[in-house]
Amino acid sequence: MRVGVQYGSDVEQVTRLLDEILANSRDVLADPAPTVIFEDFGDSALIFDAFFWIESSSERSLRGVRSAMRFEIDRVFKESDIVIAFPQRDVHVDGSVKLDRS
C-alpha cells in the first residue's frame, strides 16, 4: 500500500505511525512482519510503501482490508497533523513584466 505525505512532514513520525497502524490491525499477519519503506521524494509528496500480509480468500476481501487500512491511516494522520499530499504546482510571477493597459 502506498501513501504520500506533504513535504516537510516528520518522516520518522510517519514511519512510526504506519508501523503502529499495521501492528494494531487484526487483519495484518505478524509473520512475515509488516514493513514500512520511505520509498521516494515524489513530485508532490514524500512516498511511503507499507508491505504486509493478510489471509484472504477473495479479491473483495483484500480490497476491504486495504480500504479499512486507508480509513485508519487517514484518521491517525489527521489526529497527528500529518497531511496526505495531493498534486500541486507553485507558480512564480516575474514582477518585472509590465502590462499594457491600453
Image (cartoon, rainbow, N blue to C red):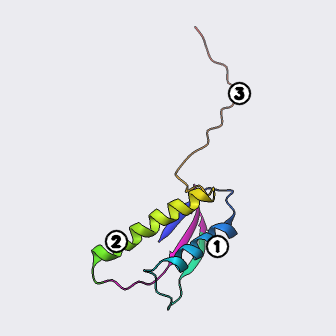
Q: Which mark is residue 63?
A: 2
Give the Cα distance between marks 1 and 3: 44 Å
Q: Which mark is residue 16?
A: 1
Work out whether 102 lies above or below 43: above
Between residue 98 and residue 52, name the one nearer to us: 52
Counting residues from the N terminus, which is met first, the one under dot 3 or under dot 2? Answer: 2
Classify mark 2: helix, strand or loop: helix
Q: Quadrant of the C terminus?
A: top right
| Label 3 with label 2: CB-CB less than 8 Å | no
- Residue 27 placement, left or right of 95: left
What is the magenta range? 40-56
Q: Specify few, some or many for label 3: CA neighbours under 10 Å numbering under 14, 14-19, or 20 or more.
A: few
Image x and y of residue 28, in percent? 46, 82
Q: Specify few, some or many for label 2: CA neighbours under 10 Å numbering under 14, 14-19, or 20 or more.
A: few
| Label 1 with label 3: CB-CB less than 8 Å | no
Counting residues from the N terminus, which is met first, the one under dot 1 or under dot 2? Answer: 1
**Observer able to see residue 45:** no
Image x and y of residue 84, in percent? 55, 57
Residue 50 part of the magenta-drawn span: yes
Q: Amino acid at mark 3?
A: Gly
Identify the residue at image location x=33%, y=83%.
56
Work out whether 2 lies above or below 89: below
